[in-house]
């Protein structure tokens, strides 16, 4: 089954942020949402996470309205990575990641520790487990939060849903690729992964499917080759793009 | 586990400190008693068999020192617990019930009952109602400004405290002599006015509030990551927030109603416990409650002794120690204590 938007709209103060979007996000697929600032990417992700209720239309997971899901059942099924998670109190990194295990409370300490260790190892932060979160750089914090999301869905239940809001924004190139490779790998394992990105080349490299948003609606959805064409991008971003093939990878360049 | 072992040892240590301070407070005063005598009197009063003990010693302990020490324990635990919960709820380690105006709000309610001549049974109710109004108001304010709730809350506290001071001023003018003396006692806080009948209400109220706070410890941890993440992790944030606001206001309101404003316990104690045991509320809340109780008993005993036969109000002592601590926090907040 999957996560579905059925003519979902969200209006705030008379302004339409998401306009009658229909889309299906399937298990086993990494869907990347792209689009210019203000095109509705984050709002769309918030509809998918249930943070925003649709003004019209429906958001369904496994055919049931998101709002009708039991809180805990939903928390065990899907995790959300917000853009920045500042913490004012000196929690250690391992403690922050362990917070992701809350939906499974009460859980044996050993299981929690396994999940925390495993998740931190996946983002290369296992060496920093005892460091205070407050002393980390923005990129390290982002990786810890990514680990917290992984811990929330690990050990993987049936078709977990992972929603990522610009996970690569504060990462260096190495970890940008590591993060998305991880997301791709999780999709291969049957997860439903939805990721908002600004970097078109990262999107092109890792997405199974692209959604190009414009003015709150989907301008184009489909395989990378269909969506990343010069005409669509020029129209949306108001720039001249050129598409290249380099070493077997699709890349777009502003000319 | 290393951490878990250390935690239970530390909590046990704090409990031991509390018990020692408690016994000391029963021993010390114009009439000095030995620890064994104190224990004898406590045992006798529990079993109703104090006939063989000197009557004046029994009376000193059971009628004066014991209710006073129990009040200190209840109020100290309530204020420190409320401080820790408030800091978790607002994600702001610099707030404290007195600093952001919850205590002075409660004092206004209590003072109004005294001056306007309501029956004294309404006193805790009025204190609670005003504390609740202030807390709810501050939470709404903090929410309109999610990016800098730290400064917003503290500035709002300045405004609420100023407003409360002026209302108290108006009430002072309207008060007669007797009411005026009672009012003065709110300003500084004093533990000498609670007897067993007040304790019968104070102790269960505080105990109930502390239990609710302890039950919300997982939510308070998750809230450190923000309301959004707490929701994603399956918590009903709004319901828990409402519960916590109510028990914080109730704990502070009940404390202020019977002992006046005792500032900075809710700020200093959670910080000390965080340094000792880390920020997890599983240990922070019980640790703060134990240490808050111990420090309040100690401060009150000190206040009774240093200028005997007069008494230094406990609020004066806690502010004398707490205010410099707060200034130190502001200076060093970029370092390990607060992080960021």
Image (cartoon, rainbow, N blue to C red):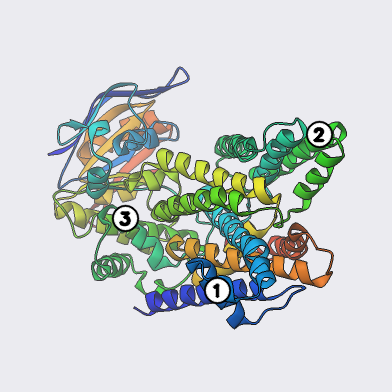
Q: What residue appears at the point 55 percent right and 44 percent down from the top-left corner? A: B250
Residue situated in front as seen by the camera: B120 or B174: B120
Chain of the residue under label 3: A
Residue under label 2: B171
Of badges 1 and 3, the one in the foreground is 1
The numbered mark, 1 or 2, whose residue comes first in the sequence reads 1
Q: What residue appears at the point 43 percent right and 48 percent down from the top-left corner? A: A83
Q: From where the camera sits, is residue A35 visible?
A: no
Establish whether labels 1 and 3 are both on one chain.
no
The answer for how far apart the CA atoms under marks 1 and 2 are is 40 Å
Establish whether labels 2 and 3 are both on one chain.
no
Looking at the rendered structure, the secondary structure element under dot 2 is: helix
Mark drawn on residue A103: none
Residue situated in front as seen by the camera: A169 or B98: B98
x, y percent for residue A89: 52, 60
Looking at the rendered structure, the secondary structure element under dot 3 is: helix
Which image quarter: residue A221?
A: top left
Residue situated in front as seen by the camera: B217 or B31: B31
Mark drawn on residue B19: 1
Chain of the residue under label 2: B
Residue under label 3: A102
Chain of the residue under label 1: B
A230 lies above or below B40: above
């Amino acid at each position: 089954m999957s996560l579905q938007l059925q003519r979902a709209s969200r209006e705030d103060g008379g302004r339409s942020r998401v306009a009658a979007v229909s889309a299906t996000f399937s298990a086993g697929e990494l869907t990347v949402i792209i689009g210019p600032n203000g095109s509705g990417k984050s709002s769309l992700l918030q509809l998918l996470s249930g943070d925003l209720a649709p003004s019209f239309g429906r958001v369904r997971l496994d055919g049931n309205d998101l709002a009708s899901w039991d809180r805990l059942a939903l928390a065990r099924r899907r995790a959300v990575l917000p853009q920045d998670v500042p913490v004012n109190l000196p929690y250690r990194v391992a403690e922050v990641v362990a917070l992701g295990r809350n939906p499974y409370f009460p859980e044996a300490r050993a299981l929690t520790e396994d999940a925390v260790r495993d998740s931190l190892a996946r983002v290369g932060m296992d060496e920093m487990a005892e460091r205070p979160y407050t002393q980390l750089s923005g990129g390290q914090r982002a990786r810890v939060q990514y680990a917290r999301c992984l811990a929330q869905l690990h050990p993987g239940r049936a078709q977990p849903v992972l929603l990522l809001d610009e996970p690569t924004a504060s990462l260096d190139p190495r970890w940008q690729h590591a993060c998305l490779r991880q997301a791709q790998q999780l999709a291969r394992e049957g997860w439903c992964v939805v990721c908002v990105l600004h970097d078109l080349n990262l999107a092109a490299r890792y997405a199974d499917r692209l959604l190009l948003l414009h003015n709150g609606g989907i301008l184009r959805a489909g395989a990378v080759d269909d969506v990343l064409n010069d005409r669509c991008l020029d129209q949306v971003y108001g720039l001249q793009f050129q598409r290249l093939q380099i070493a077997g990878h699709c890349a777009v360049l502003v000319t | 586990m290393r951490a878990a072992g250390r935690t239970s040892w530390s909590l046990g240590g704090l409990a031991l400190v509390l018990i020692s301070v408690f016994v000391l407070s029963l021993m010390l005063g114009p009439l000095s008693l030995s620890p064994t005598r104190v224990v004898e009197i406590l045992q006798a009063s529990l079993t109703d068999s104090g006939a063989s003990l000197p009557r004046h010693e029994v009376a000193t302990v059971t009628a004066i020192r014991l209710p006073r020490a129990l009040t200190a324990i209840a109020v100290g635990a309530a204020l420190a617990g409320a401080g820790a919960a408030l800091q978790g709820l607002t994600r702001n380690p610099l707030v404290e019930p007195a600093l952001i105006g919850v205590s002075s709000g409660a004092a206004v309610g209590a003072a109004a009952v005294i001056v306007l001549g309501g029956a004294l049974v309404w006193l805790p109710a009025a204190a609670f109602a005003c504390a609740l109004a202030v807390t709810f108001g501050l939470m709404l304010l903090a929410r309109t400004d999610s990016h800098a709730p730290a400064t917003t809350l503290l500035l709002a506290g300045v405004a609420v405290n100023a407003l409360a001071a002026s209302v108290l001023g108006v009430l002072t003018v309207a008060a007669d002599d007797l009411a005026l003396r009672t009012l003065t006692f709110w300003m500084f806080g004093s533990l000498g006015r609670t007897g067993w009948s007040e304790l019968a209400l104070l102790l269960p109220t505080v105990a109930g509030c502390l239990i609710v706070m302890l039950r919300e410890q997982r939510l308070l941890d998750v809230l450190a990551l923000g309301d959004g993440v707490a929701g994603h992790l399956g918590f009903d944030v709004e319901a828990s927030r409402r519960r916590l606001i109510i028990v914080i206001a109730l704990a502070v309101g009940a404390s202020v109603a019977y002992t006046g404003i005792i500032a900075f316990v809710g700020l200093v104690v959670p910080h000390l416990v965080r340094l000792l045991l880390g920020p997890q509320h599983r240990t922070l809340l019980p640790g703060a409650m134990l240490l808050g109780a111990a420090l309040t008993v100690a401060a009150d005993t000190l206040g009774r002794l240093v200028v005997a036969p007069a008494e230094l109000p406990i609020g004066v002592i806690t502010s004398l120690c707490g205010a410099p601590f707060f200034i130190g926090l502001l200076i060093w907040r970029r370092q390990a204590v607060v992080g960021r």
